[in-house]
Image (cartoon, grey):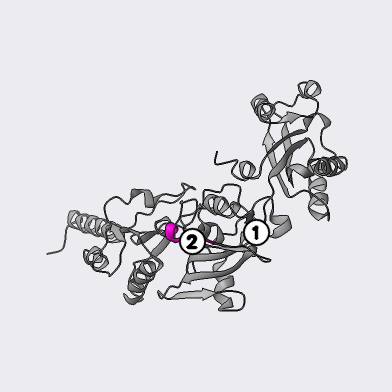
């Protein structure tokens, strides 16, 4: 007897639902095998919804488990377990810091998400001297690195605009901010790293030792291993910062001035450019936080709904260098073609500027 059309439809429905179930529901033995691992940390199997989201809000892949490791050895044990399951296993691993990736980098569909901040408290060691550096866990936040290194009058050379991100997270991307034109991105200021490879090995790498892994993991989006420690170059930290914003109406002048500044030998310490559509509230906000060079004339500045190009710059200084700083800043500003009514500036501490987005 030939199957009826209704029977065919039932079969297709069963296959379709079965496909969805197979894709999203892990094999029952996976949680059991993970719980049996000899680790000091712990796995979460039920409260995993946060690990299925990231800052980009473009991807959502629920994992089977979230791992909270107590040590680098825990991470290595877990990754080795997944590796030994063989090439036919669909179980994957992703390291997660603060989840600020855009396209699901810190997610693992039906896999294991490792919360790197669980091992951030394993200690941070600052090494002052002629070539100072800090050894920091991959799960350490950059803001905490800054606080610790400032105790020695030191700080990393290159930053991101937002410091409440993990060391391993930004080093797996690049780590770009307004200091990049002087020092390169954050990945250009790393002397050495410890990495857990896809086989679960703990490997130390540098430009001289395991150099292929070193260069692949920096900016490698987590595809070449999990960064568990980084040795980061430091420099003397200033006490204060002159923070400046100027506006342009035409892109050509804006771009030419920015290129001139980043190419000059004596220039600002931080330079970034961005585009805004002005509304009255933006400049009013700036006036409340910054000093206008000429407040009476600045109040006459009219640019609502116009596209504006902004240069944001800083000059580092210590209190006893304020006069020299003022002279250098005025010399640099005199070479620019910004709108005269749009100059705003303020003096803040070094940490207030670097943590401006986290305050």
- Residue 328 visible in the snapshot: yes
Q: Position of residue 72 (x, y in %)?
A: 41, 67
Residue interval drawn in magenta:
120-125
**Residue 29 in which image quadrant:** bottom left
**Residue 326 in which image quadrant:** top right
- Residue 64 visible in the snapshot: no
Outermost residue toward the bottom in this view: 209
* Distance Cα–Cα, label 2 vs label 1: 17 Å
Task: Please name whichever residue, 318 or 213, is drawn nearer the observer in this view of the structure.
Answer: 318
Q: Is residue 7 above or below residue 340?
A: below
Count of residue discs: 2
Q: Position of residue 131 (x, y in %)?
A: 67, 66
Magenta residue check for 108: no
Residue topped by disc 1: 185
Q: Position of residue 134 (x, y in %)?
A: 57, 62
- Quick one: quadrant of the C terminus? top right
User: Mark 2: few, some, or many residues within 10 Å (few <14, many ≥20)?
Assistant: many
Residue topped by disc 2: 138
Q: Is residue 234 above or below residue 261?
A: below
In terms of sequence position, does the residue under pointer 2 or pointer 1 come before the other? 2
Q: Is residue 272 above or below residue 72?
A: above
């Amino acid at each position: 007897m030939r199957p009826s059309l209704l029977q065919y439809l039932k079969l297709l429905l069963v296959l379709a639902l079965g496909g969805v179930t197979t894709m999203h529901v892990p094999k029952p033995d996976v949680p059991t095998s993970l719980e049996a691992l000899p680790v000091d940390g712990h796995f979460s199997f039920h409260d995993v919804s946060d690990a299925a989201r990231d800052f980009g809000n473009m991807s959502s892949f629920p994992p089977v488990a979230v791992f909270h490791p107590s040590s680098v050895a825990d991470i290595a044990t877990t990754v080795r377990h997944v590796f030994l399951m063989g090439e036919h296993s669909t179980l994957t691993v992703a390291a997660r810091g603060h989840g600020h990736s855009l396209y699901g980098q810190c997610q693992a569909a039906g896999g294991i998400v490792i919360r790197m901040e669980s091992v951030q408290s394993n200690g941070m060691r600052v090494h002052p001297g002629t070539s100072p550096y800090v050894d920091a866990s991959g799960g350490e936040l950059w803001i905490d690195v800054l606080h610790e290194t400032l105790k020695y009058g030191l700080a990393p050379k290159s930053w991101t605009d937002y410091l409440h991100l993990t060391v391993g997270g930004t080093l797996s991307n690049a780590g770009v901010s307004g200091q990049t034109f002087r020092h390169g991105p954050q990945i250009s200021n790393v002397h050495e790293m410890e990495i857990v490879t896809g086989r679960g090995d703990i490997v130390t790498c540098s430009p001289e030792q395991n150099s292929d892994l070193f260069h692949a993991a920096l900016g490698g989006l987590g595809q070449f291993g999990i960064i568990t420690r980084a040795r980061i170059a430091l420099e003397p930290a200033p006490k204060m910062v002159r923070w400046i914003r100027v506006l342009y109406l035409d892109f050509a002048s804006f771009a030419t001035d920015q290129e001139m500044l980043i190419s000059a030998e004596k220039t600002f310490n931080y330079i970034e450019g961005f585009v805004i559509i002005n509304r009255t509230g933006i400049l009013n906000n700036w006036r409340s936080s910054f000093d206008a060079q000429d407040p009476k004339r600045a109040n006459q500045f009219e640019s609502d709904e116009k596209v504006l190009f902004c240069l944001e710059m800083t000059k580092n200084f210590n209190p006893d260098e304020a006069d020299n700083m003022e002279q250098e800043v005025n010399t640099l500003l005199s070479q620019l073609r910004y709108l005269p009514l749009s100059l705003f500036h303020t003096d803040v501490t070094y940490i207030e500027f670097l943590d401006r987005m986290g305050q």
